[in-house]
Amino acid sequence: MKGDPAITVDGMSRRYSSGKDAFYAVRDLNLSVNEGQLFGLLGTNGAGKTSSLEVIQGLSRATEGTVRVLGMDPVRERRDLRPSLGIMLQKGGLPQDLTARESLSMWAGTCSNSLPVDEVLERVGMRDRGDIRVKFLSGGEARRLDLACAIIGQPLVLFLDEPTTGLDPESRRNTWQLIADLKASGVTIMLTTHYLDEAESLCDQLAIMHRGSVVRRGTVAEVVADHPAQIKVNRPSLALPTLPGADIHTEGDSVVITTATVQETLTELLVWAQRNNVTLSGLDARAASLETVFLSIADQFDQQVKFEGASV
C-alpha cells in the first residue's frame, strides 16, 4: 500500500575494524522512508552517508541493528530483493571499451523487467552519445550513463549517491526532472547530495548526518524552523540599539544580527534608522535556509575538532 514504509533502519551501526582500532562510520541510525517518498541523506565529507547507503543497499552488513527494504533483509534476502532495486554508486565502473549503448544493453541483461535501451538513453539525454565508448565520455556523461543503468530495470526503490556530480547546469535540471518524474510514478528514492538546492528542490524528507549520527531530520521547513535568520549591514555611523531577542556582533566592517523573528527585528531596525536619520548601507536580510543550517553544523564540527585537538 502506498505510504507504507519501504525502508526501515533501526539502531543500525557500521563499525570498521575492532578493538582499539575500531571506528564507527555510522552509529545507532534510525530512519523510515515511506513508499513513493524521496528521502535525502546529507552531511559533510566523512559524515557516514555512503557507509549508511552501502548497508541499506545490502552491499555490506550492519555491525548492529536491523535494516529492511520492502520488508526484506537486503543482505540475507538479496536474491529476492535485487530485482526491485536500482543503485547508482558514486563511481559506476562500467567497461571502458564498450560503447554507452553496449554497456547499457549489458546491464539490461541482468534485469528481469528492463526498459528498451534507446528509451532510457533518451531519458537521460544520451541518445546521440550511444555509440561513444565509455572511456571517451565526459565525467557528466558517465554519470548520466550510471543513472541509466540504475533505472533501466524499473526499480521500486532507487538509491542515488551524488547523482548530479560533474553535470552542467542544464543536465542537472534535466536530471532533477527525471528524478521528480520517477517519484511521481511511485518509485521510492533515497538520495545523497552535496548540492543543497538539489535537496531543497527534490526531497520530501531529509536527514543531516554529522560524525556518523543524524543531527537534524524532517522536511526542509522543519529542519530550518528553529534556526535563526540573519541580517547584515555595513557598520553605521551610530551604534545599533538593543534589539529584543536578537544577537548583534561585528564581522570586519559589517554588523551581523541573528534573530528568530526576522520580520519584527528588521522592522525595529528600520524604524530606528529612520528616527535617527541613519542610512543602512549594504542591508541584507535572509531567512534561515538549508544552507545556513548545514554550514552551522559544519562549523560546529570544525570547532569540536579544534577543541578535541587542543585537549589531547
Image (spheres, rainbow, N blue to C red):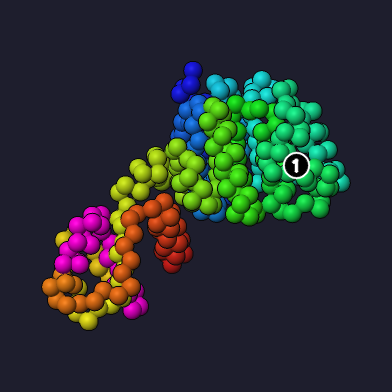
Q: Position of residue 50 (x, y in %)?
A: 59, 44
The answer to which of 279 and 243 lies nearer the viewer is 279
With respect to residue 62, does 140 lie above or below? below
Query: Is 229 on the left or on the right of 124, as rendered?
Result: left
Circle 1 sits on which residue? 127
- Residue placed farthest to the top in the image? 1
What segment is highlighted magenta in the picture? 250-271
* Residue 259 inside the magenta-drawn segment: yes
**Quarter of the view holding residue 287:** bottom left
Task: Kindly identify the residue that appears in the image at 49 percent across and 32 percent down.
Answer: 37
The answer to which of 220 and 30 lies nearer the viewer is 220
Q: Position of residue 135 (x, y in %)?
A: 81, 51
User: Callout 1: few (<14), some (14-19), or many (20+) C-alpha neighbours within 10 Å?
Assistant: some
Q: Position of residue 114 (x, y in %)?
A: 73, 26
Query: What amino acid is labelled 1 in the image?
Result: Arg
Residue 62 seen in render = no
